[in-house]
Every structure is written in structure tokens, then in C-alpha cells.
Image: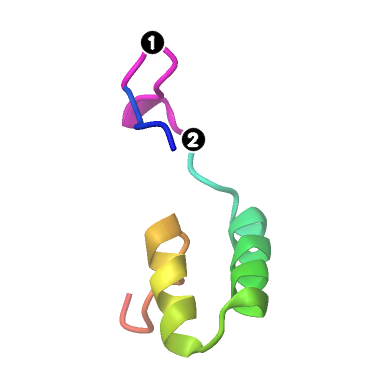
Amino acid sequence: MMAANSSAKDIADDDLEPLADETARQAQRVVAAYATDADECRMLLSMLGIAPATRGE
């Protein structure tokens, strides 16, 4: 396996566009379908940056 190297092709955080709400919901459904349990689902959603907002927000 090759090590990850920084290059000119890297995308800066400023260049990233936020996901549309519908796209995020679709991604959440896919992750939930493949997760083995609720804890794994929460972890994967968090890692991908598509975790749903908490009820207090």
C-alpha cells in the first residue's frame, strides 16, 4: 500500500462546497444500510462529516 503524499492535486478545505441537504440524506441512508449497528453508523456518519444535527441544534 502506498503512503498518502501531499501534492498539487490536494483540495483545500476552502475549496470544498457544502453538500446539498438531499445529497447528505441519501448518503446517510446508504451508510445506515451498510453499518452493522447504531454505534458504527454514528461513527461512520461523523467520520464522513454527514452526521445529522443533534435535536438541540
Magenta-drawn stretch contains 8: yes
What crowding class fits label 2: few (fewer than 14 Cα within 10 Å), some (14-19), or many (20 or more)? few
Chain part drawn in magenta: 6-16
| Left or right of residue 12, residue 29 in this image | right
Rounded to the nearest angstrom, the CA distance separating label 2 from label 1 is: 19 Å
- Tell me the tag on residue 17: 2
Q: Which residue is mark 1?
A: 8
Q: Is 14 included in the stretch rendered in magenta?
A: yes
Place of residue 49 in the rendered image (x, y in percent of width and height, measured from the top left): 41, 57
Q: Position of residue 35 (x, y in %)?
A: 57, 78
Circle 1 packing at 10 Å, graded few (<14), some (14-19), many (20+), is few
Residue drawn at point x = 31 percent, y = 21 percent = 6
Left of 9 or right of it: where is 25?
right
What residue lies at 60% left-to-right and 70% top-to-bottom? 31
Nearer the observer: mark 2 or 1; the answer is 1
Question: Magenta-highlighted stretch: main secondary structure?
Answer: loop
What residue appears at the point 67 percent right and 68 percent down from the top-left corner? 30
